């Protein structure tokens, strides 16, 4: 049996071993808040964070968290002030803009291939 403290209310609960570390009460509240925001955005696309907060009662920080986790993904732009963690351009989901994702992937692949070449050259010596 795994016991954890809820990330929201900090009460201990039996954790299933996967998914968010929320107790059943906080998980239900989180799901209800998410549903309220999602429904509001379907009816009012492109609104700002404060508008969403005043209409649904869900804090902007929670909406930003859902966007960073790519849980709240919509083709309709949501203006809550989310920015790329690398270049600080405005984004609407995740932690990085598409350009920074591509750049990091390219850097990773080139680094990986150069390490692989070094490993091969050491083996042949």
Image (tube, helix red, strand yellow):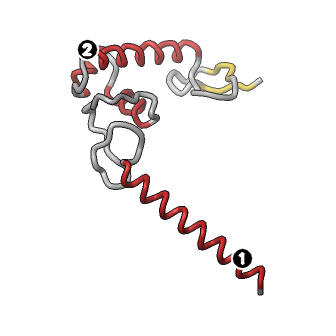
The kind of secondary structure element at disc 2 is helix
Above or below residue 30? Residue 120 is: below
Q: Where is residue 2 in the image (x, y as percent from the top left)?
A: 73, 26
Residue sitting nearer the eye, 14 or 124: 124
In the depicted structure, whether residue 94 falls above or below residue 107:
above
Q: Where is residue 28 in the image (x, y as percent from the top left)?
A: 51, 13
Instruction: Count neighbours of disc 1 (C-alpha within 10 A) and say few if under 14, some if 14 to 19, many if 20 or more.
Output: few
Disc assigned to residue 55: 2
Image disc number at residue 107: none
Residue 69 falls left or right of residue 57: right
Q: Residue furthest bottom?
A: 125
Q: Which residue is drawn at 41% across and 28% down?
A: 72
- The x, y position of residue 51, in whole percent, is 22, 21
Task: Give whichever of 43, 20 is nearer the camera.
Answer: 43
* Residue identifier under label 1: 120
Q: Residues within 10 Å of mark 2 (few under 14, many from 20)?
A: few
At mark 1, the secondary structure is helix
Q: Between residues 125 and 72, which one lies in front from this camera angle?
A: 125
Measured from the top left, where is residue 79 in percent x and y? 25, 32
Residue at image position (42%, 37%) is 68
Residue at 30% across, 20% down:
41
The alpha-carbon separation of the residues under discs 2 and 1 comes to: 60 Å
- Between marks 2 and 1 in the image, the one whose residue lies nearer the viewer: 1
State which quarter of the image contains the N terminus: top right
- 87 horizontally vs 68: left or right: left
Horizontally, residue 50 falls left or right of residue 37, namely left
Would residue 107 appear left or right of 5 to someone viewing this image?
left
Where is residue 42, by image quadrant?
Answer: top left
Q: In which quarter of the image is the C terminus?
A: bottom right
């Amino acid at each position: 049996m795994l016991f954890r403290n809820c990330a929201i209310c900090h009460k201990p609960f039996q954790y299933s071993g996967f998914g968010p570390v929320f107790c059943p009460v906080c998980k239900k509240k989180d799901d209800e808040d998410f549903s309220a925001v999602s429904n509001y955005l379907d009816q009012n696309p492109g609104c700002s964070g404060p508008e969403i907060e005043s209409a649904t009662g869900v804090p902007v920080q929670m909406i930003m968290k859902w966007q960073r986790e790519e849980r709240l993904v919509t083709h309709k732009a949501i203006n809550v002030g989310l920015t790329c963690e690398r270049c600080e351009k405005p984004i609407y989901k995740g932690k990085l803009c598409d350009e920074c994702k591509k750049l990091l992937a390219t850097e990773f692949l080139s680094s990986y291939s150069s390490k692989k070449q070094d490993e091969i050259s050491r083996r042949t010596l």
